[in-house]
Amino acid sequence: MTEPTPTLLADRYRIESLIASGGMAKVYLAEDTRLERKVAIKVIHTHLAADDSFREKFIREAKIAAKLSHPNLVNVFDQGEVGTSLFLVMEYVSGITLRDALNDFGKFTPKRTLEVFEPFLQGLAAAHAAGILHRDIKPENVLLADDGRVKLSDFGLSRTIDSHTQSGSLVGTVAYISPELATRGIADARSDVYSAGIMFFEMLTGKQPFLGDQAVQVVYQHANDSVPKPSTLEPEIPEAFDRLVLWATAREAGDRPSNASELLKAVTALRSGSRMNFGPTVVNRTEPFAAAATQVLIDQNFEAVAATAVIGANPTETFEALNGADGALHELSATQTKRRWILPIVTVLVAVIASAAGWWFGSGPGGIVTLPELSNRTIAQATTALDPLGAHVTQAKENSGSVASGLVIRTEPVAGSWLWRGGNVKLVISAGPKLVTVPNLKGKNLVDATTTLSVAGFKLGKTNESFNAAAVGTIFDYTASDGTKIAEGSKIDISISLGSLPTLIGVSVDTATATLKALGITVSKTTEVFSDTVASGSVVGITQPNGPLGKGGSVELQVSKGTNAVVMPNLVGETISASIAVLKQLGLNAIIDTNALRKNWGIVRVKSTSVPAGGTLRIGDSVTIRAR
């Protein structure tokens, strides 16, 4: 996992590393620089934070979570927004989740189960007492801290409690969802209790009570079957634990504890060995009574069996009823005659209802299907994959720097979610990266620039330090500094000034070399040049390589050879040969303009020159002498 460059969020929270990433947000480990403590920061994905309705929902639920303060709850410290970013600051808990523990070590002993379950219930009871539902109880949201504490986390699906909280859509994890939430979308505190009971079952047995290849199968079992006793999987589990599970997971919400506090009292009593009150008696499908009732439908001697089921489980009372006074026998006979007609009718009705339920929850409109992973597929591929689900598909475009234009970024609901057959599915299609202008970074220091880039949706790229006229430590150049728009989320390389190079003109070569060495720069070469202002042997200037010059670089020194200025002598009246010699000695070139023969140049006199006497020339210049 790559750690992000340290970033100061809201001028307070210094992000240190990425802890986790999900469909809604990323969670970072950070340091609160004001209070000097570690915190966990949940940063909502940009595409969600840009949705006004989501922002309103996020802020509302952050306020709900902030109301809770309990040793067994992950506390919320702060909520804020910087630019387009929404974030939530929470207590950082070092440790593992209950799911990690179950995966690594398997089932818990009954004693260890109570040791974990009781503090978990204390946290949930505090939430219920504050009028808040959790709605996503599962081992992934129970943290086992390194110091032994147990904490309930992630109130992302939380709601305030009213008499019948309507979810609007099915929420929570399928393996732990309550029957009323699965069938009617309605939840109250007893729904959290049901989920807790399922988790208790899993801790004792290492398995979930309802399994299936598809989510619809699991949901159907929650809605129509009773949770079995844990001892049916692990015979050594005490009966009191069975009774606790059956009470917490009763199919009818009215047969369960009214809230986590009531369930907590039973768990506390169980730990202390006190007498427990598990509420109303819960009939389980594995009980002998249920087996007898099933036998009524298939036994040839159904009159006697039915009597056993109706009158009671005491064989003596049943025998006396069948062999007692004539009046009693007559009454039983009439009852048995009625049952000959009733039982076949009941059998047919049960079969019809079961068949209809199978169709409704299977291939019918009430079926629940699992949404496949469709990211990075074309629109055609995605719609083809959704056709068998009967989903109503809509599309929306969104910029993405990681998914190519025209491909699916994600679905709403997210992949792995379950929905009613024929439900709505939105395909969010990539419109390619959003092109934006990089904010002005010139003159900023590294910390300010990093924060500015993070808020604008960019990442800090490479940094290099170079000698520049800008103030030391400030940025003088960066990627797309000319205003060119680039993809949002791009890495921005920046150049930081080391300050200007010192002025070395007029100093000796040795002094200049030592000064540059102290700055981390070497002299690769010296070149002699003429200079009218710098004495011979002193530095005239520095030649830098193409591109920025930083520490470890090298330069060339230009060293003065002195001046190359020449004063034009008076050559009028001198012979041509003598004039040529004088000009050559001064480093000048002579151009002869005469009609005299070369053999006579020693006697023919110069009449004028192209440069008058006293004029300034440079070594290598040419002078025309005329002798006509």
Image: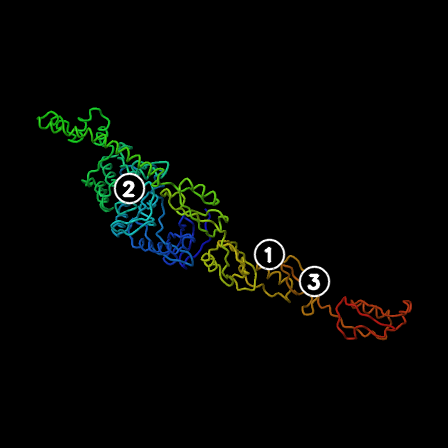
Where the C terminus falls, by quadrant? bottom right
Spatial CA distance of label 2 from label 3 is 93 Å
Spatial CA distance of label 1 from label 2 is 72 Å
**Dot 1, how many residues are within 10 Å of its Cα: few (below 14), some (14-19), or many (20+)?**
some
Say whether residue 251 is left or right of residue 472: left
Residue at image position (51%, 63%) is 443
Are dots 1 and 2 in contact, CB under 8 Å? no
Say whether residue 89 is left or right of residue 248: right
Say whether residue 442 is left or right of residue 372: right
Say whether residue 252 is left or right of residue 102: left
Are dots 2 and 3 in contact, CB under 8 Å? no
Image-quadrant location for residue 620: bottom right
Residue 16 in picture, x, y percent from top left: 43, 52
Using the image as rendered, state which of residue 14 and residue 220 is in the foreground: 220
Residue 192 in picture, x, y percent from top left: 28, 45
Residue 211 in picture, x, y percent from top left: 34, 36
SS class of the residue under badge 3? strand
The label number, if any, that marks residue 553 in the structure image: 1
Residue 179 in picture, x, y percent from top left: 28, 42
Using the image as rendered, state which of residue 77 and residue 177 is in the foreground: 177
Identity, as a three-letter code, of the amino acid under mark 2: Pro
Using the image as rendered, state which of residue 46 and residue 420 is in the foreground: 420
Spatial CA distance of label 1 from label 3 is 21 Å
Q: Earlier in the sequence, mark 1 or mark 3?
A: 3
**Residue linked to disc 3:** 528
Image-quadrant location for residue 103: top left
**Dot 2, how many residues are within 10 Å of its Cα: few (below 14), some (14-19), or many (20+)?**
many
